[in-house]
Image: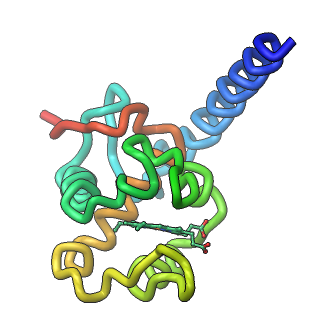
Amino acid sequence: MKVSQSLCGALLAVSVAGAWAQSAAPAAAAGTAPYKVVDGNKVDPVTMEGFRTWRAAACDRCHGANQEGLVGPSLVNSLKTLSKDDFVKTVMNGRPNTQMVAFSGNATVTKNIDALYAYLKGRSDGAITTARVEPMK
Ligand code: HEC
């Protein structure tokens, strides 16, 4: 019983992810997405810098190596609804009385906040299919 339930959950997760990937396509095609990606993992220089910033700031300690959440929430989910403004505010100021600290004192993060958003938005949209990315040729 337990096994079939979790299988069911996995199938649901896959179909939901598929739906999001499809809905991401028009934004990318219309050129409104903040990232560019081909083959799911080859990205433009800005998005690449976002990935490097993610690694340098060790956001993965709390949000997971695949942005799917640990102590902190899944950013794949969060960025489907969180606006860019709210993203920037949260990362800069942190969330009082939670483990989400302010990164306004982190020069790498403040300098690359747009790039960081671009990378995470691509992950959230399902357009960037693996957490690890490489430069586009
Ligand atoms: C020490 C653990 C920790 C680290 C490191 C951390 N976070 Fe968080 N983050 C959290 C927690 C916990 C929350 C949930 C706060 C709350 O309850 O509102 C959170 C919330 C967030 C949210 C808001 C999500 C939402 O749905 O409202 C964003 C965006 C976010 N973090 C981005 C980042 C980024 C980007 C980094 C790296 C620069 C980072 N976090 C590093 C623990 C962490």
Quadrant where the image shows the N terminus: top right
Q: Nearer the viewer, residue 30 or 3?
A: 3
Q: Residue furthest front?
A: 2
Residue sitting nearer the eye, 62 or 39: 62
Q: Is residue 54 above or below residue 85?
A: above
Q: Specify whether 31 is left or right of 41.
A: right
Q: Is residue 39 above or below residue 85?
A: above
Q: Residue at x 30, y 33 (%)?
A: 41
**Which residue, as the protein is rendered here, is positioned at the far left?**
137
| Residue appearing at x 75%, y 20% in the figure | 6
The location of residue 19, given as percent across then percent down, is 68, 33
Does 8 appear above or below 101? above
Q: Position of residue 125 (x, y in %)?
A: 54, 45
Q: Is residue 119 visible?
A: yes
Circle count: 0
Q: Quadrant of residue 65?
A: top left
Q: Which of the 4 image quadrants contains residue 40? A: top left
- Depth check: give the residue in front, 68 or 135: 68
Q: Residue at x 62, y 33 (%)?
A: 22
Residue 9 falls left or right of residue 100:
right
The residue at 26%/42% (across/down) is 43
